[in-house]
Image (tube, grey):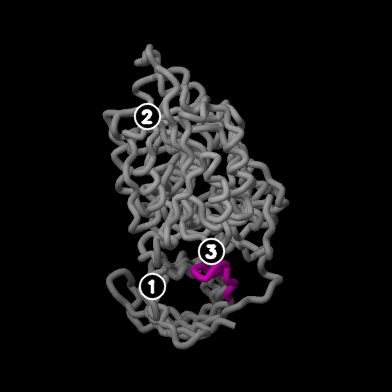
């Protein structure tokens, strides 16, 4: 690789590393100082403020395991009964949820029943139109309130510029799952960030389990694609020039997901919903509101794109392995951290990687058409569940360290030929026969080992590489794919190489696919690359 190319790769490496450090290090560490320097000093207080009328809104779907306990919890709320309206929407449940809610009609609990599952957003839009309260309080069926929570949530609205108040959700883990423990630890940090953003009255996104808004500021939720109702509603309030705050003493409790796979699916849905409406959130980056822009960029944008940054950082580091001991040490450290995370010795690290994989999968899914507006609930750790499903995680080739002893579920035999073009000085046709042994992480993602035979400029070489294979969720029988390899060429002209490509995975039955692909391969010692074309077969065992 040329010195100029490596120079730009080094710049990219340090920029990417800085963005990660900013998101997960500098931002939370400096937030207490930022909140102290820029907190609001002047408030527009309503001197005639009285307890407002409140509508408590819950969208429920197949919640028979927890809904009665939730209703009992609501009946214990310390707030004037004549000022508290409770609307519970049954979103086409297939269990006894509606039947249980209907039993409490005489105690002030109103059932709003939908004929079929249309999704949480559609139900909240419907409940909002019925609600009569000045303040709307949103919560989940499995979130249990402290008795004073409504009083605590409505108190900030004496400030006329407060549009949203978010409560403090405390997660507890009884599942014993690694993801459950990681989620609980992660949420503790998230609550600290929310606390300081609340001091600034610029909370970036509420919490759907426990938040309140002025009814006049409600923005109708889109229903064509899945949406994070709490984030969408609160960001629209910020865009309208009002403030969102955090009330640490307004406490609700919730259990983490019972199954690791359930928590992972939930994170995928959250990631997908965030990317579905990313463009509508970008006005928060308005440079004329620099503090809000900084919080949104550091807290949300960087976090949503962390998997993209991590992958690019990994690739950049791999390309710089010959550029000095610093890059070799950083690459070794990266592999070590990944190994420790995948071994589940550090729950928070495993959760971090799983969360980022879920976000990446959600990113790709956001480009696809959703089958319906409905949603499915996940069992929490205080409920019964029928199975424990193991959740896996892709991390390029480092995960082979832990997956290698297991049986692979797919393999490929690819016949490839490189053809010279303007990127190469090689003037002859180059033969490339390649095979892979794949470990499936997900239906979309495989990691594996590759090897075969290459003949380049009359030099015979045997490649050994770590490989990644990503199917993009577009189309039906023909799926776009992205592939990548990085490794070593063994032979008289041994050297490092990397290659990347893409193409089509054409299904040829349930277990086989025809591969039509192409890409670019770079050879370290030759200092050049070439375009290759590939036709092959993928067999899933």
Q: Quadrant of residue 200?
A: top left
Distance Cα–Cα, label 2 vs label 1: 44 Å
Mark 2 sits on what residue? 163
Residue at x 40%, y 17% (from the top left corner): 49
In this view of the protein, can residue 326 be seen by the observer? no
Q: Position of residue 210 (x, y in %)?
A: 51, 37
The answer to if 59 sits in the magenta stretch is no
Q: Position of residue 442 (x, y in %)?
A: 55, 68
Locate the C terminus and report the quarter of the image it occupies: bottom right
Which residue range is magenta in the image? 438-447
Closer to the chain start, of discs 1 and 3, is 3
Q: Position of residue 521 (x, y in %)?
A: 41, 70
Q: Nearer the viewer, residue 469 or 28?
A: 28
In the image, residue 532 above or below residue 106? below
Neighbours of disc 2 within 10 Å: few (<14), some (14-19), many (20+): many
Q: Secondary structure at mark 3?
A: loop
Residue at far front of view: 106
Neighbours of disc 3 within 10 Å: few (<14), some (14-19), many (20+): some
Q: Nearer the viewer, residue 122 or 460?
A: 122
Q: Quadrant of residue 50?
A: top left
Q: Secondary structure at mark 1?
A: strand
Q: Are marks 3 and 2 in contact (CB under 8 Å)?
A: no
> Is 445 displayed left or right of 237 in the figure?
right
Residue at x 56%, y 68% (from the top left corner): 447
> Is 456 displayed left or right of 104 in the figure?
left
Q: Position of residue 34 (x, y in %)?
A: 45, 23
Q: What's the mark number on residue 480?
A: 1
Closer to the chain start, of discs 2 and 1, is 2
Residue at x 55%, y 58% (from the top left corner): 62
Q: Are marks 1 and 3 in contact (CB under 8 Å)?
A: no
Closer to the chain start, of discs 3 and 2, is 3
Mark 3 sits on what residue? 94
């Amino acid at each position: 690789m040329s010195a100029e190319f490596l120079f730009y790769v080094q710049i990219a490496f340090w920029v990417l590393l800085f963005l990660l450090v900013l998101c997960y290090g500098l931002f939370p560490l400096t937030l207490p100082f930022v909140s102290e320097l820029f907190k609001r000093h002047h408030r527009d207080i309503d001197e005639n403020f009285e307890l407002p009328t409140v509508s408590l809104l819950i969208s429920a779907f197949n919640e028979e395991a927890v809904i009665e306990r939730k209703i009992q919890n609501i009946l214990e709320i310390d707030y004037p009964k004549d000022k508290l309206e409770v609307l519970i929407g049954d979103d086409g449940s297939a269990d006894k949820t509606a039947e249980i809610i209907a039993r409490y009609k005489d105690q002030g609990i109103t059932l709003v029943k939908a004929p079929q599952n249309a999704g949480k957003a559609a139900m909240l839009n419907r409940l909002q139109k019925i609600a009569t309260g000045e303040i709307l309080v949103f919560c989940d069926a499995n979130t249990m309130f402290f008795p004073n929570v409504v009083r605590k949530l409505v108190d900030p609205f004496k400030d006329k510029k407060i549009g949203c108040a978010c409560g403090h959700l405390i997660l507890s883990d009884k599942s014993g799952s690694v993801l459950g423990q990681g989620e609980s630890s992660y949420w503790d940090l998230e609550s600290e960030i929310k606390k300081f953003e609340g001091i600034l009255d610029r909370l970036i996104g509420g919490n759907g389990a426990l938040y309140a808004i002025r009814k006049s500021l409600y923005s109708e939720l889109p229903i064509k694609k899945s949406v994070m109702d709490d984030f969408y509603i609160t960001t629209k309030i910020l865009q309208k020039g009002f403030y969102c705050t955090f009330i640490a003493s307004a406490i609700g409790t919730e259990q983490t997901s019972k199954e690791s796979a359930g928590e992972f699916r939930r994170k995928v849905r959250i990631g997908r919903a965030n990317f579905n409406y990313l463009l509508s959130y970008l006005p928060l980056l308005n440079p004329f509101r620099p503090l809000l822009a900084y919080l949104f960029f550091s807290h949300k944008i960087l976090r949503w794109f962390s998997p993209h940054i991590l992958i690019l950082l990994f690739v950049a580091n791999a390309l710089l392995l010959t550029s000095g001991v610093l890059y070799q040490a950083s690459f070794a450290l990266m592999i070590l951290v990944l190994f420790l995370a995948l071994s589940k010795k550090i729950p928070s690290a495993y959760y971090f990687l799983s969360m980022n994989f879920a976000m990446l999968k959600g990113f790709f899914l956001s480009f696809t058409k959703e089958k319906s507006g409905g949603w499915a609930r996940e069992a929490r750790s205080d409920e019964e569940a029928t199975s424990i499903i193991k959740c896996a995680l892709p991390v390029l080739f480092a995960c082979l360290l832990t997956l290698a002893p297991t049986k692979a579920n797919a393999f490929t035999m690819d016949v490839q030929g490189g053809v010279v073009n303007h990127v190469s000085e090689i003037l002859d046709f180059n033969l490339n026969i390649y095979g892979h042994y794949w470990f499936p992480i997900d239906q979309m993602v495989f990691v594996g080992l590759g090897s075969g035979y290459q003949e380049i400029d009359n030099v015979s070489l045997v490649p050994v590489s770590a490989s990644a294979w990503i199917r993009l969720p577009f189309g039906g029988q023909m799926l776009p794919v992205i592939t990548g390899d990085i490794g070593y060429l063994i032979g008289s002209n041994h050297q490092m190489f990397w290659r990347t490509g893409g193409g089509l995975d054409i299904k040829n039955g349930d277990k086989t696919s025809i591969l039509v692909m192409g890409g670019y391969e770079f050879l370290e010692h030759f200092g050049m690359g070439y375009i290759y074309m590939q036709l092959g077969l993928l067999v899933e065992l």
